Image (cartoon, coloured by chain):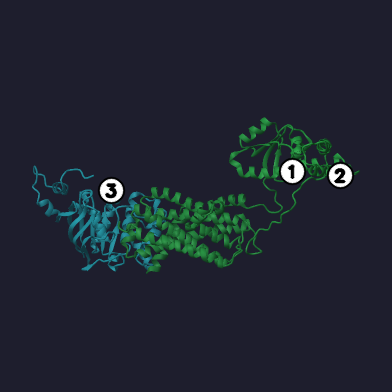
Chain colours: A green, B cyan
Amino acid sequence: MTLTVLAAMVRKDLMLFFADRRSVIMAFAVPILVASFFGSVFSGSSSDAEPARIAIAVVDQDGSTISKAIVSGLQGDRNLNVAVPTEEDARASVTRGRTSVAAIIPKGFGDAAGQAFFGSAPKPALDLLFDPSRSAEVAMVRGILTEHVMQAVSREMFGGAQGRQYVERMLPQIESSQTLPPDQKRLLVQMLRTVQDFYNQPNQTAQTAGPGLSMPYTVRERAMTANTNAGYNGYAHSFAGMGIQFLLFAMANLGIEVLLERQQGLWKRLRSAPLSRTTLLAGKTISGTIISLLTLFVSFGFAIVVFKVRISGSVVGFLAVSLACSLMASTFGLLVAALGKTPATARGVTTLAVLMMVMLGGAWVPTFIFPAWLQQATLVVPARWAVDGLDAMTWRGIGLAGAVLPTLMLLAFAVLFGGVAATQFRWEE
Amino acid sequence: MLIINSLRKTFGSLVAVDDVSFSIERGQLVGLLGPNGAGKTTTVSMIAGLVTPDRGEVLIAGRRLAGDTDPAKRRIGLVPQDVALYDDLSARDNLRFFGALYDFRGRALEERMANALALVGLADRARDKVKTFSGGMKRRLNLAAGLLHDPDILLLDEPTVGVDPQSRNAIFDNLETLKQRGKALLYTTHYMEEAERLADRIVVIDHGKVIADDTLAGLTGGVVAVAGQRPTLESVFLTLTGRSLRD
């Protein structure tokens, strides 16, 4: 008898689910749309892809060889999109958020920077105006700017006209200095004469200045995944995260449907039949699990076909995590049905609960940006295990072993939610 | 067929039902009357197994009803006060689901569905979604869902609320048919004329207690006629329960 009843309950719930166009759209179309968007944003750049450029403005009030070289260097940088407006326009552009950073090279910067290069003069200030909402970009621009300023100043000082003039001006001053210790004076004069000899070589002119200081290393970057054939695909993570989010929403909705059934007297009919409480809860759990699995599989199916997401780890592991995740979500729906008083209040509370769960679970932004204590705290959030498990089985390419812990944790959450729901459910009508 | 013995139910400090006893024979319709909050629905809920009594017992054909899965519950059909149907499913799909709860399937289920739909005059709308039905049609289908498993006892909790006269009349005809088939019917209502027309016996309940249990003639016979007017069930009811508002 139980099987007939369970089959009937599942059939009925599936029919109701597919009869409700809003539920279907929320469960299938919306996660795909949102995950596609997040995937495109966070998918990372491939080697041949054009990186997103940071918009900056450079105001050259100096007009020196060095400042011009700095502007030229910045304009040639593949990470930047450089505009050269007036100071007033640059300020307005940053204020309105159109430009992340504006660098103002003040008058006399080139001269002062050249003198400060050998450490004998005060360092000139370079003004950086930035949009406070884009501090990450400011840090990046600061680094790029440092590289180009060092390159421009060193090139000029080691081979440009300004460097020659500086050496010619400094040599007599050092030779006639009464304050420098004789040893230091001798060494400094020796160094500057060597530089002067370098300038006076036949093939050295002001126009053929050397490259200046440059980065003394290059970087070989390798994305690490467990499976050498697996590559990072941002869509895999976004479909996992958004899949979990909308699956939890769908199941919370299933719980709210139970509250509506209670309001409509339908639960009285169910309770008046000779059915155990276990059968009634099991029927709801199975329906929810099937709907959750469908949601997840349709989302990932789309991601596999359209965005070339691959299950680079274990297919069995992927299925195990998906099943455990669906079971967890389904029992979460039961929890909503058990603890909710009315559909309206339950809807508000569960929306907040789901959003908190997926946010802390790393579905929106990776958990590594959280403070250390919060990263530890998210271990008690089921969405974290679901996202980690699905990530492990897809782009991380970890084998079946990587699915064991997330699956067990999700099953433990399912037992916890189901247990609380069973004890807290209002059985009396 | 159905014996209620000293049922009592409290919700916190509120005594909803207190020592309620009555019985219903085969082929008999008992009207359960009472003002709002008198304890009618709680009594029906205890008989249907939805609420566990604090004390007392419900006997079905002499056997005590015990637990959620008691097979004796198969002998009870409930027609709730609300239209307890799935609006997004067809009439057939609703009945198929409710029939499956009693382990009916295949041809047996099809036959029961056809009979129930024919009884309430909805055979030609079987495949239509419930949300397209009028209020009266929904009430009739609500009744069909309650008797799909052919119960010996049918509990009807205000089954004609918000129904037009035609549908109400059709429901009355259905109930007469069920009585003739030997079913025991418990019918709660606020409409006195319904009880006058249908009930073989009337139980009046107030403040959780049974304050009258008799036939219509027995109840009206005990009240003195005023100005030569024969007492009605309503005047008897108001005499028994008072005229103060029960909100």
Q: Residue at the right extreme?
A: A202
Residue type, label 3? Pro
Image position of A45 (left or right of B162): right
> Viewer-proximal residue, A293 or B170?
A293
Mark nearer the N terminus (2 vs 1)? 1
Q: Which mark is residue A150?
A: 1
Residue at 28% across, 54% down: B171
Co-location on one chain, circles 2 and 3: no
Q: Secondary structure at mark 3?
A: helix
Specify whether A192 is left or right of B55: right
Q: Amino acid at mark 1?
A: Met
Q: Residue under circle 2?
A: A198
Count of numbered labels shown in the rendering:
3
Few, some or many residues within 10 Å of mark 3 (<14, 14–19, 20+):
few
Identify the subunit bearing mark 2.
A
Say if B60 sits above or below A36 in the image.
below
The label nearer to you, 2 versus 3, is 2
- Real-space Cα separation, disc 2 to disc 1, in angstroms: 20 Å
Q: Is residue A127 above or below residue A219?
A: above
Q: Which residue is mark 3?
A: B165
Q: x and y percent of residue A143 in the render?
A: 68, 45
Is label 3 in contact with label 1 (beta carbons under 8 Å)?
A: no
